[in-house]
Amino acid sequence: MNFSRIFSLLIYLVYAGFAIREREVVIALFPLIGMAFIWFPSLAKFFDQLGVGISRRAAPMDPNTPSCVFVMIGWALLLSPALIGLVVKLASM
């Protein structure tokens, strides 16, 4: 298991603890999308192939896109609830 997966799991456990304390299910579910990109980067290419057939307007991703791009997308999705919470806290000061 690489460090990216270990750190993402630790961050998710923090989210899950916070979600249980605040009784907010969305806080615990939203980061799972980001974890899917981090843990299974090839899954994004699978959904890309499905997306073109479903919407008929989506342009397919380049098949040569390195998996590190999908991992970066996953980290952005994983950390977005924390960044939104930080902005809300700073705005309420």
Image (cartoon, rainbow, N blue to C red):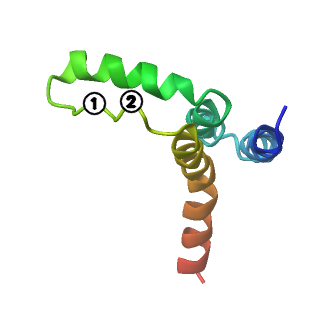
Residue 81 to residue 24: above or below? below
Residue 41 to residue 18: above or below? above
Name the outermost residue toward the front. Answer: 64
Along the line of sight, the residue nearer the viewer: 73 or 65:
65
Residue 3 lies, in percent from the top left, at: 83, 44
Residue kind at label 2, given as amino acid type:
Pro
How far is the residue under mark 2 from the one under mark 1? Answer: 8 Å
Q: Secondary structure at mark 2?
A: loop
In the rendered structure, find residue 43 and report the number of the disc placed on it.
none
Residue kind at label 1, given as amino acid type:
Pro
- Would residue 66 be found to the left or right of residue 75 on screen? left
Name the outermost residue toward the left. Answer: 57
Q: Across the whole image, how many numbered discs are drawn on residues?
A: 2
Mark 2 Cα shell of 10 Å, populated few (<14), some (14-19), many (≥20): few
Residue 88 lies, in percent from the top left, at: 55, 69
Q: Quadrant of the C terminus?
A: bottom right
CB under 8 Å between callouts 2 and 1? yes
Task: Say which quarter of the image contains residue 67.
Answer: top right
In the rendered structure, find residue 63 and report the number of the disc placed on it.
2
**Which residue is denoted by mark 1 in the rendering?**
60
The residue positioned 52% from the left and 45% from the top of the image is 69
The residue positioned 39% from the left and 30% from the top of the image is 63
